Image: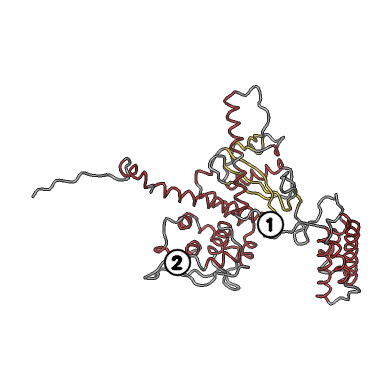
Amino acid sequence: MIKKTIEKAQQSMFFTLKDTLDQRHPLYQLTKAINWEQFEKLFSPLYCQDNGRPCKPIRLMVGLLILKHLRNLSDESVVEQWSENLYYQYFCGESEFVAGQPCDASELVHFRNRIGEVGIEQILKESIRINGEDSKEEAVNIDTTVQEKNITYPIDDKLYKRIIKRCRKISEEEGLPVRQSYTRTLKQLSVIQRFRNNAKSHKKVKKADKKVKTIAGRLLRELERNLGEGTTYQKEIELYKRVLNQGKNDKDKIYSLHEPEVKCISKGKAHKKHEFGNKVSIVLTQYTRVIVGALSFRNPYDGHTLPETLSQTERLLDGQCPKRATVDRGYRWKDIVNGVVIQTPKPFNKKQTKYKQVKIKKDFTRRAGIEPIIGHLKQDHRLGRNFYKGIIGDSMNLMLAAAAFNFKRMMRKWKSSFWRFFDYKNIWKYFFKSDLLVISPIPKTTF
């Protein structure tokens, strides 16, 4: 239920955050720049009006989501730090200091699921709007990267043991009989598997792996017989069967039981041959470095991601689509997509003038600048490891990371512009060679 708004006409006589905090602080200026009312209008219809417990303020929840990716924090950490940081509280709409946590960390999960991908996209759109004219360039750079999921490195033996553990748990919860638990047998097999890298133990380890798979199949078939038909665990049982039946060279393999949609992607990196997650596409303006598009996919060919990526960019820019996009060789065989000219590295045409060749070469030089941007998204804004669940979580994490990057860009811009004005070494330029200060002569006085 929507919480009733409280009129705050009479404020504290001695202490208000608005008058106490430093108004030159970038987070203070970001608070003034964001249009919070649009989030209230968009997300209010998602709540019932006269039933249930009053919800937390929408501005509070949106502010916590932004701060989480802006400061690279977890749900628990951002809620804990909110009670200690006055700028965080002012950013989320508080006028006075509030002691205690604003909400439980799990409420951020429920709020993300409530607003969905459409709501997260509105946050990204607002971050683009704040950057103003910098986001309206005709030329953009596009590249793809892998957003890794929060799973361990997939090994067949590891998946089989998790199936065994899950079958035992279901049998215990439902009170089903188990003919044999294989507890001692699995301990003995684990001791043998420890020496996997020893050349003399190769045959024993291979035999132990096969035995673990056999035990997982036995427990799964026994569980299926005891549960019968029409059970609520049917979807899980089908998933476990796929894991046990999949081969080494099969397509659409299962790499994780709690994240079955994860794909194995190879980007040709020397230090990381395989990455387990999903592919994402980033659209960056060529000179101002504003992210104007961020879309999540599974694992398609890079060129097939262009139509949907450019459609999202046009949607985020209110119908204004870039005219030229510079990409790498992973997008080859694509020349024009949705009316946008796609520039791919290839030998120059003899009909092209020298000026045109130099211009194209500069575009490809600028395209390389998207690589460090992707690095910042992964290291500073939680794109490197995705903790959100499911395919929807992949899209949410990407767009929130892109929005945080755009917000942080403007915060750096405001901070640098302030210190550029107060450059004490060159302060005479501002006061004596500009119109900021007009020095008038001292009038003569008569005595």
Measure how far apart labels 1 and 2 are at the Cα level.
Answer: 34 Å
> x and y percent of residue 308 in the render?
67, 45
Residue that lies at the very extreme toward the bottom in this rendered image: 175
Q: Is residue 83 above or below residue 428?
A: below
Residue 95 image label: 2
Residue that numbered label 1 is attached to: 392
The secondary structure type at the circle numbered 2 is loop
How many marks overall? 2
Query: Type of residue at label 1?
Result: Ile
What amino acid is labelled 2 in the image? Ser
Query: Residue placed at 45% from the left, 51% from the top?
Result: 415
Q: Identify the secondary structure beneath mark 1.
A: helix
Which residue: 81% across, 63% down? 235
> Against 425, is 400 above or below?
below
Q: How crowded is mark 2: few (under 14 residues within 10 Å), some or many (20 or more)?
A: some
Residue 239 in view in this figure: no
